[in-house]
Amino acid sequence: MAVMALLAVGCQNTPTPTNDSAQVVMNAILQRKSVRSYTSDTIATDVMENLLRAAMAAPSGRNIQPWSFVVLTDKNQYGDIFGNNFNLPMFEAAAKVVVICADTSVLLPPRENPNAEPIRQSNGTWRDDMGAVTENLLLAAEAHGLGACWTACYPYADRMEPVKKALGLPATVVPYSIIPIGHPAGTEQPKDKWDTSRIHYNHW
Amino acid sequence: MAVMALLAVGCQNTPTPTNDSAQVVMNAILQRKSVRSYTSDTIATDVMENLLRAAMAAPSGRNIQPWSFVVLTDKNQYGDIFGNNFNLPMFEAAAKVVVICADTSVLLPPRENPNAEPIRQSNGTWRDDMGAVTENLLLAAEAHGLGACWTACYPYADRMEPVKKALGLPATVVPYSIIPIGHPAGTEQPKDKWDTSRIHYNHW
């Protein structure tokens, strides 16, 4: 919509300012909100691919890319996966659900000696990476007119265990976050969290 | 630039598809890269504000908003802050540096009883939240034609201690990530990390 408005201006009047695309991206970031109610519309396959493409474009410490994704399409599984630890009706109403997983243990050279033989070790920044992965997916959903909700799974054992078992995750892989995605029923609005008291200059 | 190309198509030929803004956002996400070399150009005040606005639009567990930001403008401080633990020339070359901080301890009702009196407690998801905060800032930088680089500070004690001391951070506040930002010198390209083997359906 924002681009359509810009197009009209661009065609009729003056050159479009060079920062239009910045404004479109800012809109997606500022309009993203937790959406927990959805219409019954489905999500196109190429749109789902875009969401996963966005997630995999996240940065990661030492470029280790600790992520994997389990896309749920079989609602008969949901009782086993979500049990009593999640808002089950929200997931049942969503067109798709993505379980975003992290491998917590990776083959890497020791941090002190990048040229040495890789050893299996904890990846110290996987949790930070996964926050970025999740946010990228949420922003891509917003940009496509979809609604989604970051549902924490890690670090809560009571949530992780049934999910790990139901999905057959490998031992070193944890279910990090679970994202229901659908066309918003239209009730949720973004929060205005802008607060200049959170900004300091040069010193706290 | 992406919007300018769309504008040309929109004006000359067929109606622009309704998902142009989705493509603009996808471009920012897919084009984001770690930029470590910068020109000497400065960053406009309103652009810096946009970057911080984007960061503060991140989601957070229980909407606790654990973030604060220290914007560095005095390069005379950099020796004390970065010491030998960081790539000092990269930070010196950047037009601005933002230290993204997290308050690890917050006043909240107990998780089991949301109506009870708030108590000071660890915020269990601050690290996840801060990954999203950092990614939002990086994406906003990319969208404005700027380059930035996620530099981890937490969880490394040797990096955090000098920063905490130099910036006078409160006891419960940790320097999470440090982001140099500038106009890219043009050398870095995004990585293509799309890998369908990372996607599973219904089961690992």
Image (cartoon, coloured by chain):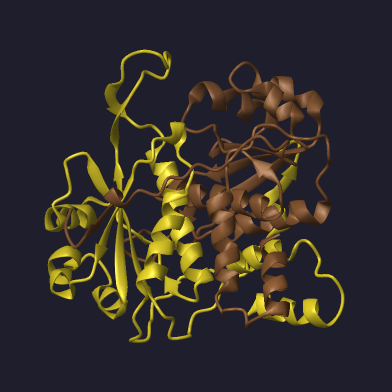
Chain colours: A yellow, B brown
Q: Is residue B17 left or right of residue A161?
A: right
- Nearer to the camera, B90 or A78: B90
User: Quadrant of the rendered structure where residue B153 is?
Assistant: top right
Q: Is residue A191 above or below residue B80?
A: below
Q: Is residue A16 left or right of residue B3?
A: right
Q: Residue at x 38, y 32 (%)?
A: A124
Taking the image as drawn, is residue B66 in sight?
Answer: no
Q: Position of residue B19 (x, y in %)?
A: 55, 75
Q: Is residue A202 above or below residue B48?
A: above
Location of the N terminus of chain B (image quadrant): bottom right
- Nearer to the camera, B201 or B74: B201
Q: Residue at x 83, y 50 (%)?
A: B44
Residue sitting at the far front: B13
User: Quadrant of the rendered structure where residue B53 is?
Assistant: bottom right
- Nearer to the camera, B11 or A52: B11
Q: Position of residue B172 (x, y in %)?
A: 53, 39
Q: Is residue A44 above or below residue A83?
A: below
Q: Is residue B193 above or below residue A160?
A: above
